Amino acid sequence: MNSVPEWRAPDRATFEREVLAHDRPAVLRGVAGHWPAVQAGQAGPQGAAAYIARHDSGALVDAILIPPAEHGRLFYAPGMEGFNFLRNRVTVSSVIEQVARYSHFASAPSVAVQSALMRECVPGLLESHRLPLLDAAVEPRIWVGNHVITPAHFDQSHNIACVVSGRRRFTLFPPEQLDNLYIGPLDFAPTPTPISLVDFHAPDFERFPRFRAALETACVVDLEPGDALYIPTLWWHHVESFGVFNVLVNYWWRTPDHPGARSLESVVTALRRGSR
């Protein structure tokens, strides 16, 4: 596997000069270590869970429930007719209660709040959980749950993902690896952009032989609470959360001239052309 360069709690000037300008993934160790929610979890996941639950506004957020048989993998249903999870609108604290209950199960469902705007569901955390690397206008989103695997996909924006509780593993691929990742339908995916059809834990190399070539370009990053990862626009990332309670805060933003501002179809066409 290839390595990703790391910085220790960089300031904004360093981030813009040494990271953002090069348009490559970068690990930002300890950049969110001062956040109260991170500090609350140092004695255990219960501390972080209780801290976040206390700030729940009661707003309904999007959440998913994946059956135990899927082992946390967000994917399609058999025959690709629908998806292998249920969607619901619930509060952040109700998902935290589910996570606590499932932590006692030998084989638990996976549950997660996905991409909830913090100003709507936990507004009391905004002031004390700022990321000085970005403008205040870039809105943070929160992800709360247990063990979930999100197949490789890309964002049409820059992304900084900050781990608050638990541990996250990101497997990254350059944009031009599109054909080697065997993506699913553009207009029918469990994420906003198409996903890789390859099961990274048990790859079927007979069905997906070019995935071996993708793996030669892969970078694997493990993040602990307080760490963050910068993911440039269009970089593929497979994400797996570990631990009984996981929280991530992320920031998506675009620059006007960035290729991610184009339509999804034109982006995929350009990536496919560039991979040949």
Image (spheres, rainbow, N blue to C red):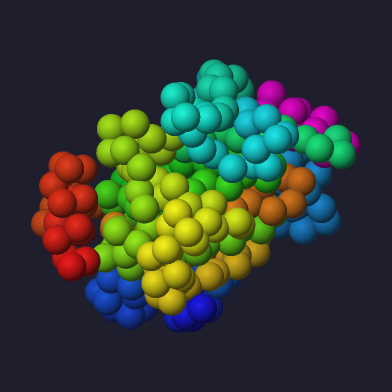
Q: Residue at x 82, y 30 (%)?
A: 101
Visible residue check, residue 197: yes
Eyeballing the image, is 185 above or below 29? above
Front-most of 124 and 187?
A: 187
Pinpoint residue 65: horizontal percent, then vertical percent: 62, 28
Q: Residue at x 17, y 43 (%)?
A: 265
Inspect the magenta stretch and tell me whether residue 258 lies in it: no
Q: Which residues, given as a range, are shown in magenta?
A: 93-104
Front-most of 49 and 143?
A: 143
Pinpoint residue 5: horizontal percent, then vertical percent: 45, 81
In the image: residue 247, left or right of residue 220: right
Eyeballing the image, is 40 above or below 214? above
Q: Quadrant of residue 26?
A: bottom left
In the image: residue 199, left or right of residue 139: right
Eyeballing the image, is 108 above or below 14? above
- Main secondary structure found in the magenta portion: helix
Q: Residue at x 42, y 63 (%)?
A: 209
In the image: residue 52, left or right of residue 12: right
Pinpoint residue 157: horizontal percent, then vertical percent: 29, 51
Q: Quadrant of residue 97?
A: top right
Inspect the magenta stretch and tell me whether residue 98 lies in it: yes
Q: Residue at x 81, y 37 (%)?
A: 107
Q: Quadrant of residue 110?
A: top right
Figure label count: 0
| Image quarter of the C terminus | bottom left
Pinpoint residue 230: horizontal percent, then vertical percent: 41, 64
Visible residue check, residue 92: no
Front-most of 5 and 273?
A: 273
